[in-house]
Amino acid sequence: MNHPQSLPALESKLPRVGTTIFTVMSALAVEHGAVNLGQGFPDFDCDPRLVDAVTGAMRSGCNQYPPMAGVVALREAIAAKIEACTGSRYDPNTEITVTAGATQAIFTAVMALVRPGDEVIVIEPVYDSYVPAIELAGGTAVAVAMDAHFRVPWDAVRAAVTPRTRAIMINSPHNPSGTILREADLRELEAIVAAHELFVISDEVYEHMVFDGETHESVSRHPLLAARAFVVSSFGKTFHVTGWKVGYCAAPAALTAEFRKVHQFNVFTVNTPMQHGLASYLSDPAPWLGLPAFYQLKRDLFRTGLAGSRFRLLPAEGTYFQLADYGAISDRSEFEFAKWLTAEVGVAAIPLSAFYQRPVENRIVRFCFAKTDDTLQRALERLATL
Ligand code: PMP
Ligand code: GLN
């Protein structure tokens, strides 16, 4: 392209943001032919029945704009699924919106809620899309750090609330730590939001990856919280189709009305055939009911394979991520260690430091175990020597 002599000055709205760590590490994995346990995505395919359902929808002509809030059958199926899982009934017409993945749902909820000058409490380590969304809305993210066991310190959350606080964003099961919120945590959250008139954005994309017989404490199970919450999930995680980018937001009608005002102008609608395919596939609960056992086996395979190494494995209660402390192996920084591991050992990981707003070094990296057993074995052969 021919560059003109001078350009109008473009002042970045996100001056601290570069390319996401997930993209950076995936590119490095390709460059070095490393096993990619960095970016979180399965390396196995989804259920062929799901592909058939989407293909069938395309062939039968479901190829034009769907309703703005999502295909009715899919919204009904989502409402039924949430009710089956949590006992809470959302109205598919007024309380459920199909989104282009969880990322767009989170972004849209933040845009609908946050005004310039507002503060939003986030829990660090924090998923990478939250803070930029808050800042683009003109708000300020106030980070509260998890404790040494990656639990939410509710006293610190309470202390972080100011008259400007508008919302709290939570994520359980938690990426990257793999910890989950329990009922007592939600009761603490409930007390805080009730006392200060706050909203909640609850990112529950790993809702079906909870291990060792624990239950997923959805915000939807708690009526007082649900009444002021945007609950977000993603079919990308639940059905092994991260590239499809279809998710949803469930929220009370008054919140959904504001959510949809933003939604209709940032995507308007989400692709039609996948919505029809997902709607029919959701009639069978077996695929998500089997997920905890499916991923627990992978978690255990991965953890067992590393048991003889010098990695110290942190508890992994949910998600498809495993944190590993490499302090006994190297004193490199997390980013340097992740790069070294990718280039020299042949396994890509994500530095935990990428999930903090400030420089934090714990000598911990995140591995993704949403991989075939073969892939995990190949990675383990390399990692087990460390
Ligand atoms: N939240 C968390 C915690 C995630 O890990 C991810 C994606 N991996 C997302 C949101 C985004 O989900 P989606 O791909 O559906 O936009
Ligand atoms: N959420 C995925 C992860 O944590 C990555 C998604 C992305 O690349 N933005 O690895």
Image: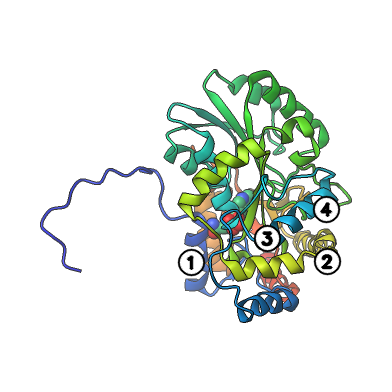
Which kind of residue does numbered mark 3 sit on?
Phe
Question: Which of the two residues, 58 or 16, is positioned nearer the viewer here?
Answer: 58
> Circles 2 and 1: CB distance less than 8 Å?
no
The nearer-to-camera label among 2 and 4 is: 2
Residue beneath disc 4: 211
In the rendered image, residue 188, in percent from the top left (x then y), is placed at 75, 26
Question: Which of the two residues, 338 or 30, is positioned nearer the viewer here?
Answer: 30
Q: Secondary structure at mark 1?
A: helix
Q: Real-space Cα distance between discs 1 and 3?
A: 27 Å
Which kind of residue does numbered mark 1 sit on?
Leu
The N terminus sits in image quarter: bottom left
Residue 284 is marked as 2
Q: Secondary structure at mark 2?
A: loop
Q: Secondary structure at mark 3?
A: helix
The tag earlier along the polypeptide, 2 or 3, is 3
Residue 28 is marked as 1
> Circles 1 and 4: CB distance less than 8 Å?
no
The nearer-to-camera label among 3 and 4 is: 3
Q: Real-space Cα distance between discs 2 and 4?
A: 21 Å
Q: Real-space Cα distance between discs 2 and 3?
A: 14 Å
In the image, farthest residue toward the bottom: 59
The tag earlier along the polypeptide, 3 or 4, is 4
From the viewer's perspective, tell me whether residue 281 is left or right of residue 242. right
